[in-house]
Amino acid sequence: MSAVANFKYMTESGVKEGSLRLEDYQTAERAGMSVASLINAKYADADPAWGSAFEQGCASLGIYAKDDPARGIQATKISDILDGSATARLAGETLAVGGTIVAPSQQGTTPATRVFFPEVVLSLMNQYLLEDNDPELAIWNRMISARETINSAMFTQPLINVTKPRGERSTRSSQNTLPRTMVSITASEYSKSIGGSDIGLEISHQAQQNSTVDLVATSLAQQAQGERYAKLWEDVNNVVAGNIDAGQSALPVTLASTYDAAATGGTMTQKAWLKALYDPLRKVTYDSALMTLDTFLAIQNRTGRPLIYDPSTSGPNAGALGTYGLNVEPNLLNWSVGVPNVMLVPDGVVAANHVVLFDSRYALREVVNASATYSATAEMVLQRTSVFRVDFGSLLYRLSEEAFKYLDFS
């Protein structure tokens, strides 16, 4: 048993008809892509001036996630989507200047709009999941170099190897010859599972008549966002201690005492701090750091930190700068280090007197899975239930090991 939703969409040559079948959810799930992406690829001739094929399909069936005051359109109620009333209300209406798309009536016993409903909700959820307003989540997201949203619980991790190419030097080459220096990107031998949570949604009949699809998507996204916030510190700890799911061990420790013998026992020194940040090869720039509040204060109060001139202070970095223009300071030209943006973490997430330094351009990658399983979708569409289930999860892993330095001055 199946269900199909026929819709109209505009191309440069005129109006055409497309369809979204229930089986498309299963196809998209197996391919690791969204249903909207599948429909857009299937009907790639859709005129972008009218929107993508999926967006036009929603419009032709009367599904509007948000109000459109310019055209006098109100956000569609859940009840209208589930029983097909949205399509009946829109039939024959002009959607924009220059043409008319006539919305078809509901096909068979399953309203066409019901077939669209799961993907409409998931598309909106994906938008909200990438808009983090919590301070820590917003900061953490800026520190992640790459994020990918997939519609599958399995993914294959890419392996990037630049260590060997950096050990080679390029040479002159003749025409049409391959370069000696290559960046190697391969796929891991095993697919990895993204652990996650199931979010269930049950909408009462009365609520369906008063709730829009945008409200439902927002509610689901807030629940998923709460799951992500609870998982934030676990992700940070996995970056340091290692992640079994990603096949990564703990970060190797670099002792601050290797830069300055005095940087130990919870004492950070100016010399050790500068040497830890400095990379003469310019391979990385440590622009991000994770540490506890006590560790941050220890770095702020590090031994030998330069001070602004104050006649009342004493020590090697205080006092007058000299007189009569005889104090000639060396002019350092090629000193370049990043000024780390620090995110404080709770005690225990990162060990005391330990600092995680990394280059946010290459360090971290997150894979987010936000999908509804095919079985749950089929049940909601065919049996016309008011229960909807969303599977949500994410996996964070270290993209480039060279982008990290785990500094220990304990």
Image: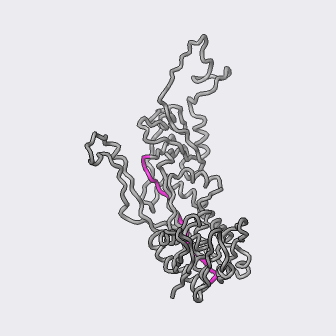
Q: Position of residue 232 (x, y in %)?
A: 57, 57
Viewer can see residue 86: yes
Residue 318 placement, left or right of 40:
right
The image shows residue 47 at horizontal and vertical percentages of 54, 67
Residue at the image point whose x is 58% and y is 28% from the top: 306
- From the viewer's perspective, is 94 left or right of 236? right
Nearest to the observer: residue 357 or residue 172? 172
Query: Which x, y percent locates residue 355?
Result: 53, 44
Q: How many marks?
A: 0
**Stretch of the chain drawn in magenta:** 385-402
* Residue 341, horizontal then vertical, whole percent: 58, 43
Residue positioned 68% across, 21% down in the render = 312
Magenta region, mostly helix, strand or loop?
strand
With respect to residue 308, does 30 lie above or below?
A: below
Residue 34 in view (yes/no)? no
Q: Nearer the viewer, residue 61 or 293?
A: 61
Q: Is residue 357 magenta?
A: no
Q: Is residue 204 above or below residue 46?
A: below
Task: Establish if 329 lies above or below 28.
Answer: above
Which residue is at 52% across, 38% downward? 338
Residue 151 drawn above or below residue 87 = above
Q: Residue furthest top?
A: 324
Residue 58: image quadrant is bottom right
Q: In the drawing, does residue 84 fall left or right of residue 31?
A: right
The structure residue drawn at horizontal position 47% and vertical position 34%, both measured from the top left corner, is: 275
Q: How is the image coloured?
A: one colour
Q: Nearer the viewer, residue 283 or 64?
A: 64
Kindly indicate the quadrant of the structure image that contains residue 85: bottom right
Q: Is residue 387 magenta?
A: yes
